[in-house]
Image (spheres, helix red, strand yellow):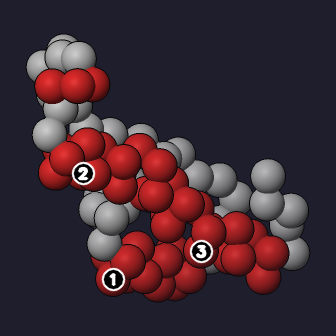
Amino acid sequence: MIGLIFDVRDQGAVASAVASLRREGPVLGLVNNAGTGSAPMRLSELGNADFRGMYEVHVEGPSTACGPRCRLCSTAGTAAS
């Protein structure tokens, strides 16, 4: 098991992580543990910049991080689930 820490919003960081994984061998799984948080508040109290930042991490981030992983699995001859 390899643990990598990177910003899922940064495609360059994702690409670097994928390159590291390629050097290690086939990728058989991924734990996407990215997240952000703030003090509890109503959505109407959340500013646009804060909302956008949370959206990038919680919605776009998994897609950015998981897409390359699925391609690695397919090139390793395993099914990506």
Where residue 19 sits: x, y (%)?
A: 47, 84
Instruction: Please tell me how crowded label 1 is: few (under 14), some (14-19), or many (20+) other residues with Cα within 10 Å.
Output: few
Instruction: Please tell me how crowded label 2 is: few (under 14), some (14-19), or many (20+) other residues with Cα within 10 Å.
Output: some
Going from N to C along the chain, the mark reached first, 2 or 1, is 1
The Cα atoms of the two marked residues, 3 and 1, are separated by 12 Å
What amino acid is found at the position of numbered circle 2 in the picture?
Answer: Gly
> Label for residue 68?
3
> Label for residue 27?
none
Q: Which residue is mark 1?
A: 12
What amino acid is found at the position of numbered circle 3 in the picture?
Answer: Pro
The Cα atoms of the two marked residues, 2 and 1, are separated by 17 Å
> Judging from the image, what secondary structure is the residue with disc 1 in?
helix
Q: Residue at x 27, y 25 (%)?
A: 43
Q: Residue at x 33, y 83 (%)?
A: 12
Where residue 20 sits: x, y (%)?
A: 43, 79
Tell me: residue 30, above or below residue 20: above
Taking the image as shown, residue 78 lies to the left or right of residue 64, namely right
Q: Which residue is mark 2?
A: 53
Q: Residue at x 50, y 54 (%)?
A: 62
Tell me: residue 37, above or below residue 55: above
Going from N to C along the chain, the mark reached first, 3 or 1, is 1
63 or 29, nearer to the observer? 63
Disc 2 versus disc 1: nearer the observer = 2
What amino acid is found at the position of numbered circle 1 in the picture?
Answer: Gly
Q: Is residue 18 visible?
A: yes
